[in-house]
Image (tube, rainbow, N blue to C red):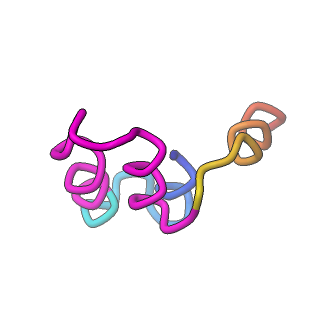
Amino acid sequence: MFSAFEESDPFAADVAHRYRDHVLVPGGSADAADLVAGFLGRPFSFDAYAAWLAR
């Protein structure tokens, strides 16, 4: 999910608010994969995390 923050400023308020609204507020009311996909605008994958680890 950090890839959404890396696209701009890691402290960008608009991205933080989108994370809050799409992931934190709904909490356990939906499947975690669906919440993350809604935040990212795409299905989640391990690829972004693997790329971050390889840095």
Range drawn in magenta: 16-42
In this rendered view, identify the residue nearer to me: 32 or 10: 32
Q: Residue at x 77, y 46 (%)?
A: 47
Q: Residue at x 28, y 55 (%)?
A: 22
The percent position of residue 55, horizontal first and vertical second, equals 80, 38
For the view shown, which residue lies furthest in the left direction? 25
Quarter of the view holding residue 16: bottom left
Q: Is residue 24 one of those drawn in magenta?
A: yes
Q: Is residue 44 one of those drawn in magenta?
A: no
For the view shown, which residue lies furthest in the front direction? 30
Q: Residue at x 57, y 53 (%)?
A: 3
In this rendered view, identify the residue nearer to me: 25 or 34: 34
The percent position of residue 41, horizontal first and vertical second, equals 49, 68
Q: Is residue 6 above or below residue 2?
A: below
The percent position of residue 8, horizontal first and vertical second, equals 49, 66
Left or right: residue 35 versus residue 42 is left
Q: Main secondary structure of the magenta part?
A: helix
Quarter of the view holding residue 50: top right
The percent position of residue 42, horizontal first and vertical second, equals 56, 65
In this rendered view, identify the residue nearer to me: 3 or 9: 3
Left or right: residue 26 versus residue 32 is left
Left or right: residue 33 versus residue 3 is left
Q: Residue at x 52, y 46 (%)?
A: 2
Left or right: residue 50 versus residue 13 is right
